[in-house]
Amino acid sequence: MSQDATHDPIPLPLAALHAELGARMVPFAGHAMPVQYPMGVMAEHVHTRTHAGLFDVSHMGQVVLEGDGAAAALERLAPMNAVDLPAGRQRYGVLLNDRGGILDDLMVANHGERLVLVVNGATKHVDMDVLRAGLPDHAPRLLKDRALLALQGPAAEDALATVVPAVASMRFMDAASNDWQGADLWISRSGYTGEDGFEVSLPVDAAEPFARALLAHDAVAPIGLGARDSLRLEAGMPLYGQDLTPEVTPVEAGLAWSIPKVRREGGAREGGFAGAERILGELTDGPSRIRVGLAPRGRAPMRAGTMLYADGAATAPLGTVTSGGFGPTVGAPVAMGYVPAGTAAGTVLMGDVRGRRLPVAVTDLPFHTPRYKR
Amino acid sequence: MKYTEDHEWLDADDNLVTVGITEYAAKQLGDVVFVELPEVGREVVKGEEIVVIESVKAASDITAPLDGEIAEVNEALADNPGLVNEDPEAAWFFKMTTTTPEEMDDLMDEDAYNEHIGE
């Protein structure tokens, strides 16, 4: 069963530090999470793009898989190449249901003797049910004794290297274990902001001193979930629960890049995953709808749920906004959503905002081009 | 200056009432990125939603604090919504004439409002 949202939110390891930093806390995925600090969402967003932001994402699920064949077993649930994932590397993938709908999106890192999955906070308990059923021989464990921090932005490498010098030589999607004052850090060069940066899993006891060591760097400021959302939206990254749901396939969602040739028709390990029939069909014939960027022409943001129409007179909507807000770096409202396949970039649709139809242009994603160190 | 439970401030000059939101409300909203103002001349009834404020995270609204008619709107906010955060006491949203000026007497004064927000 997933976390009961009516229960009091569970405080995470950095709760005392967030309070000291003046965070506004909100319940999220069953935990009390910092949504913003006194700097405010807009300034926090810009700080991450220009300096470095420290995010507490300990609500996310960290799952360990052990034993020979764990990667092959995972491939039965996710259309990815986990088997050939080298030690020290990480990949993005999606867990699917039998209809090819997305149950969650996740990162898989190969740490040598084990695979470490990072899954969404709101779905981690459902994922565990799926993983236990699908990988009974690999004893999936949801870790309760590790926190997760993300350090993102152009100054992230400098700041993290003052604490863990070895990270300077990591490339995008590398994953490594490092010792810090006796604590075993699992670091990957990745993130959810469209900036260069790192995600650091570490023992709960080490989380606060480690966070303080990073915050001591001039360029590093604490950043809340509010800015995390606007950063990922500008970077064109989908959010599970909004842009990705059990009703959406990875091909519709623009995530076909995460399905390698080896799992596609004619590949050495073709199909063999939940929902394969539909997914392989969509890869060949194309999906009926696609996730696109949406740029409202005016100043009014178009939020999730905004219905999209071909023109001002159409009575039946042709699509929906699934994420939308204001993009502080873009300096204008930004959104993403689903429209019929074949809708070209530049097409102007009408979004229904509080009963009025306002123009919105279909655009390529992302709004802000990521700057990764490859 | 008078205050509503919805964190609006009202400044009356005879029957012309200027309306904005309090610093407390502006802080709760966070960075304001869009303001939709009512049309001048619109007749409004107390409680009617007449202004939309969008912050980075969410949309909220301002309701008419009294019955009356919109006399003037602050177009500067449409061009520069961030004024609401910079100086909420100066960033008025609209001025209205009211047919029920006596209802101003029922609103909170500054001390009562500060107590309302727990300060």
Image: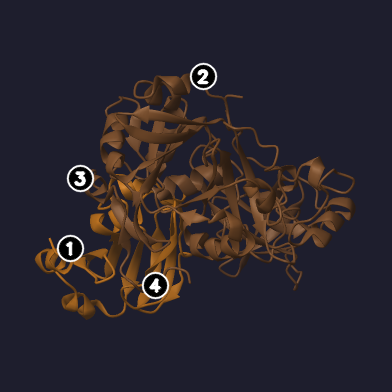
* First along the sequence among labels 2 and 3: 3
Which image quadrant: the N terminus of chain B?
A: bottom left
Q: Nearer the viewer, residue B36 or A232?
A: A232
Q: Chain of mark 2?
A: A
Q: Which residue is mark 2?
A: A169
Image coordinates of residue A289 in percent, x first then y, are 78, 59
Q: Amino acid at mark 3?
A: Glu
Q: Is residue B79 among the parts visible in the rendering? A: no
Q: Which mark is residue B69?
A: 4
Q: Residues within 10 Å of mark 2 (few under 14, many from 20)?
A: few
Q: Which mark is residue A20?
A: 3
The image quadrant that residue A345 belongs to is top right
Report the side of B20 relative to A58 (left or right).
Answer: left
Disc 2 to disc 1, C-alpha distance: 61 Å
Which image quadrant: the C terminus of chain B?
A: bottom left
Q: Secondary structure under badge 4?
A: strand
Q: Nearer the viewer, residue B20 or A40?
A: A40
Tell how many labels: 4
Kindly indicate whether the residues beneath marks 1 and 4 are on one polypeptide chain.
Answer: yes
Image coordinates of residue A310 in percent, x first then y, are 77, 62
Q: Which mark is residue B1?
A: 1
Image coordinates of residue B56 in percent, x first then y, are 44, 51
Q: Chain of mark 1?
A: B
Q: Which mark is residue A41?
A: none
The shade of chain A is: brown
The image quadrant that residue A216 belongs to is top left
Q: Residues within 10 Å of mark 3 (few under 14, many from 20)?
A: few
* First along the sequence among labels 1 and 4: 1
Q: Chain of mark 3?
A: A
The shade of chain B is: orange
Kindly indicate whether the residues beneath marks 2 and 1 are on one polypeptide chain.
Answer: no
